[in-house]
Image (cartoon, helix red, strand yellow):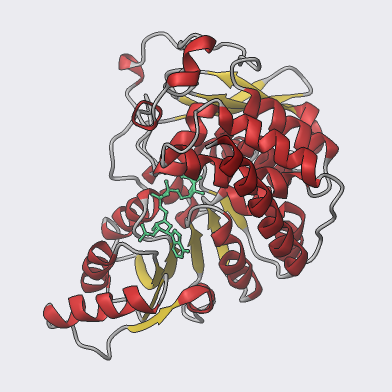
Amino acid sequence: MKAITILGSTGSIGTSALDVIRSQRNIFRVAGLAAGRNMRALAEQIREFEPECVSVLDDVVATQLRSLLAAADYPPDRTEILSGEAGTCAVAALPAAEVVISSMVGFSGLKPTYHAIQAGKDIALANKEVLVAGGEFITRAARQCNVRLVPVDSEHNAIFQCLRGESTSEIKTIWLTASGGPFRTTPLDQLVTVSPEEALRHPTWRMGPKITIDSATMMNKGLEIIEAHWLFGLPADAIQVVVHPQSTIHSMVEFQDGSFIAQLGVTDMRLPIHYALHYPARAPFNGRRMDPFTLGALEFHAPDFEKFPCLTLAYQALRQGGSLPTILNAANEVAVAAFLRADIRFTDIPRIIGDTLAALAGQEARTLEDILHLNERSRQSAYRIVRDLK
Ligand SMILES: NC(=O)c1ccc[n+]([C@@H]2O[C@H](COP(=O)([O-])OP(=O)(O)OC[C@H]3O[C@@H](n4cnc5c(N)ncnc54)[C@H](OP(=O)(O)O)[C@@H]3O)[C@@H](O)[C@H]2O)c1
């Protein structure tokens, strides 16, 4: 049995990962789970999968969880309940687990992912912000600890598959496909008034709120450009974005000899999760499959950099390097949360990111402490800009 720990088990990726494990209970078992505040969902997961240890956001929700489990007659000694960041890091490093699925949202996943790497766990990586904010630090730690980083993000999982048996030196360009989000055809001058509800209506994927807003601004693709840089060791100029509204091709690689290799499949995150958990094996998948006869026409367009300035900001941060991606990520997290609270307009998001980058450029952050510190400073700077805009 392969023991799996899931960081962010109550989220969109976390619940899809549990679906994959549920459908293959003879192969996988759950060692540990970490979640934030959704204690009803977590209590159900604990009852079903009986992990040895879980962690939750803080002591208050841990008390709620204990009451829910007691009310359901769950044996109190079966699952240890921890809380806070230290608890999440302990769950990430549980000795029993072979693979840790890193699927918390945002920067808060960085430290637990690092602890999992240090404990020698292979990482199925969904949380792209971990690589955006700490790419050099995390990939170096993975190399030093000899652990695999298998991408779960569908685009990077696709590229990872396309590169099996290939040499990185023979790549010309990585083509990240993008659905274009809900505002692909919305005129630029109408973006200023779009609401969080409209931005949360993604045309092809069902995901958590933060990544869904990132898809609407196309910052999601910007974050993915930086993620691809760290996963595949390519410069910004070798990473292109192509808008493909059907989301059938999950990404493709163009080689030096002019050949393209693409990976296709249904828009179901269980597919890349299944791949990452079985890697390097290709095991039978029980879920929905792609039917080529029903695909119809596939479209491809160039991205609109004027309408989606977040893409330009991400390319700039990657090209200029240093710690700009850490600042970009922090400012984006603050701006997206502010937009979801309806404190700012949709078009303020790139403005806040651009102004935060300008305010903090030139900072270096190589160690974990430096990265944590710069993340906090960038967030404070972005909060001030949000406050002035309100
Ligand atoms: N969803 C997708 O299809 C998809 C595709 C590709 C990549 N990704 C990436 O995967 C990551 C997760 O995305 P998602 O859509 O699954 O997000 P989500 O639905 O919002 O789930 C986030 C998870 O993180 C947990 N969490 C948040 N803060 C936490 C904290 N401080 N401590 C412990 N747990 C915490 C949440 O717990 P509670 O809900 O209990 O508070 C939840 O389980 C993101 O980085 C995203 O970019 C997602």
Q: Residue 299, image x and y in percent? A: 49, 10
Q: Residue 311, image x and y in percent? A: 65, 27
User: Which residue is rendered at x = 64% and y = 30% of the image?
Assistant: 351
Above or below residue 4? Residue 191 is above
User: Which residue is rendered at x = 48% and y = 45% of the image?
Assistant: 337
Q: Is residue 97 left or right of residue 349?
A: left
Above or below residue 339? Residue 24 is below
Q: Residue 16, image x and y in percent? A: 34, 50
Q: Residue 368, image x and y in percent? A: 73, 67
Above or below residue 374? Residue 335 is above
Which residue occupies the foreground of this view, 256 or 41? 41
Q: Quadrant of the N terminus?
A: bottom left
Q: Is residue 88 visible?
A: no
Q: Is residue 137 left or right of residue 206?
A: right
Q: Residue 208 lies in what quarter of the image?
A: top left
Above or below residue 185? Residue 8 is below
Which residue occupies the foreground of this view, 188 or 30? 188
Which residue occupies the foreground of this view, 176 or 192? 192
Q: Is residue 241 visible?
A: yes
